[in-house]
Image (spheres, rainbow, N blue to C red):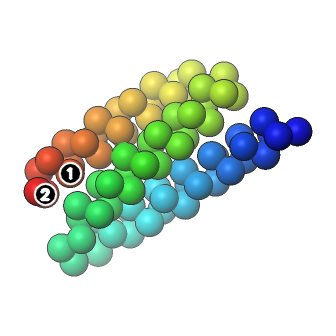
Amino acid sequence: KENMIMNKLLEWFGVLTAIAYSILVASNTGNEVYGFILLLISAIAIGLWAFLSNHYGILLLQFFYATAGIFGVIRWL
């Protein structure tokens, strides 16, 4: 039961941070670096969820998103 709760928390935390990331980057308000930080956080959360839930395709995708988040932060700093 605890694993199930943790999985749902990781999943939804990752989704909500990805939504916030998308809005920050799309808003073009100069806050893109925070958006890319949220992308990295989201990728870690969803990556952990995917690993724990045996969703390896999604896990692979999160490696790409994490990499994009790192590049985005470096580019904006």
**Nearest the eye: 10 or 63:** 10
Answer yes or no: do the residues labelled 2 and 1 have beta carbons within 8 Å?
A: yes
* Circle 2 residue: 76
Q: Nearer the viewer, residue 44 or 65?
A: 44
Q: Give me the disc on residue 10.
A: none
* Residue 36 on image: x %, y %: 29, 54
Residue 65 coordinates in the image, percent (x, y) = 36, 39
The amino acid sitting under disc 2 is Trp
Q: Is residue 17 left or right of residue 27?
A: right
- Residue found at the far front of this picture: 2
Quadrant location of the N terminus?
A: top right
Q: Position of residue 9 (x, y in %)?
A: 68, 50
Q: Quadrant of residue 62?
A: top left
Q: What is the secondary structure assignment of the residue under circle 2? A: helix
Is residue 73 rendered to the left or right of residue 35?
left
At 35% across and 32% down in the image, what residue appears?
64
Residue on which the image places disc 1 = 73
Going 69% across and 28% down the picture, which residue do you hit? 53
Q: What amino acid is at disc 1?
A: Val
Q: Residue at x 38, y 51 (%)?
A: 39
Horizontal side of residue 75 vs 33, given as left or right: left
